[in-house]
Amino acid sequence: MNPTLTAELRKLRATRTTAAAALVVAGLSGVIAVANVVLAGKEQNPPLDADTFQHIVRAPTAIVGFAMLVVGVLASAGEYRHNTIVPSLLAQPRRARLAVAKVLAVGIVGLVFAAASAVVSSAVGWLLLSSRGAPGADFGPVPSGLLVLGGTAALYGVLGVGLGLLLRNQAVAMTVALVWYFVVEQIAPQVLGAPHASTWLPGGAADAFNRLGDPAGGSAAGLVAAWVGGGLLTAYALLLAALATVVLVRRDQA
């Protein structure tokens, strides 16, 4: 497994999309940090307080998650588009091991993305808060914010890998992901008269998980408890990856 995992990590490192996604994540993390400080106390935004810093750390969670979803899809379905799946299977003929290596590699990259986001947002946020004489930061919720950031990044990456392996077409996989997020999760529950159903879907689970350890978060907006949301998101990611692995093995054996 180690050589296969190393090979998958090298592929991700050598892919320009991964580098571009990392730059976008870092840039947007800085922009979001600036927005959190500059807009504090304006347009119904909460004023600067002891919780502002930890909110800055976890604010880019959705951005990092989406970036890793894209990376996951490209790491799996992209192999079929560029016909690099053949040498990958020649190097590791056992399909299940290859799938697991992709999941682990993308998960590791997700943690790296989350760390980069946290470094940028923390540095920018701390400098701005210091220059504005903001109240002393409460660092108690910061570890849980980092856990949310890293966990969401890794799990969305796993979702991307599962979706890409299942569909084998990166354009279709990205379309399905976007339709799921904007139609199935945002619109369908309203149309069907079951608005609370969205809280049990991956997006709702991620929103709930993002409130883990946040003193001002709780179970706002009818979301499930934060730990339940994290468990649901983990279950969705692992189940999709497992399904994709089973389909991959059986499809190639047929």
Image (cartoon, grey):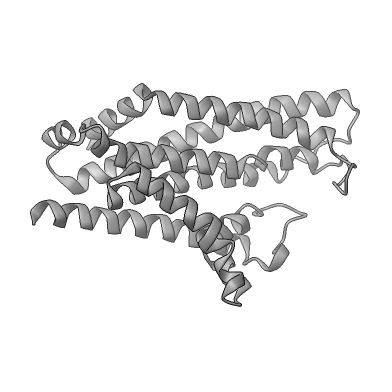
In the displayed structure, 93 sits above or below 3; it is below
Q: Residue 29: percent from the left, percent from the top?
A: 64, 32
Q: Residue 147: percent from the left, percent from the top?
A: 57, 45
Total marks in image: 0
| Residue situated in front as seen by the camera: 143 or 164 | 164
Residue drawn at point x = 48 percent, y = 57 percent: 180
Q: Residue 40: percent from the left, percent from the top?
A: 86, 39
Name the quadrant of the C terminus.
bottom left
Residue drawn at point x = 85 percent, y = 35 percent: 136
Judge left or right: residue 243 versus residue 73. Answer: left
Question: Of all residues shown, which one is farthest toward the bottom?
Answer: 193
Question: Of all residues shown, which one is farthest toward the left?
Answer: 254
**In this rendering, does residue 150 appear at all?**
no
Residue drawn at point x = 62 percent, y = 32 percent: 118
| Residue situated in front as seen by the camera: 223 or 27 | 27
Name the quadrant of the N terminus.
top left
| Residue situated in front as seen by the camera: 242 or 169 | 169
In the displayed structure, 204 sits above or below 58; it is below
Residue drawn at point x = 59 percent, y = 31 percent: 117
| Residue situated in front as seen by the camera: 49 or 85 | 85
Judge left or right: residue 65 versus residue 132. Answer: left
Q: Residue 187: percent from the left, percent from the top?
A: 58, 64
Judge left or right: residue 239 versus residue 206. Answer: left
**In this rendering, does residue 87 appear at all?**
yes
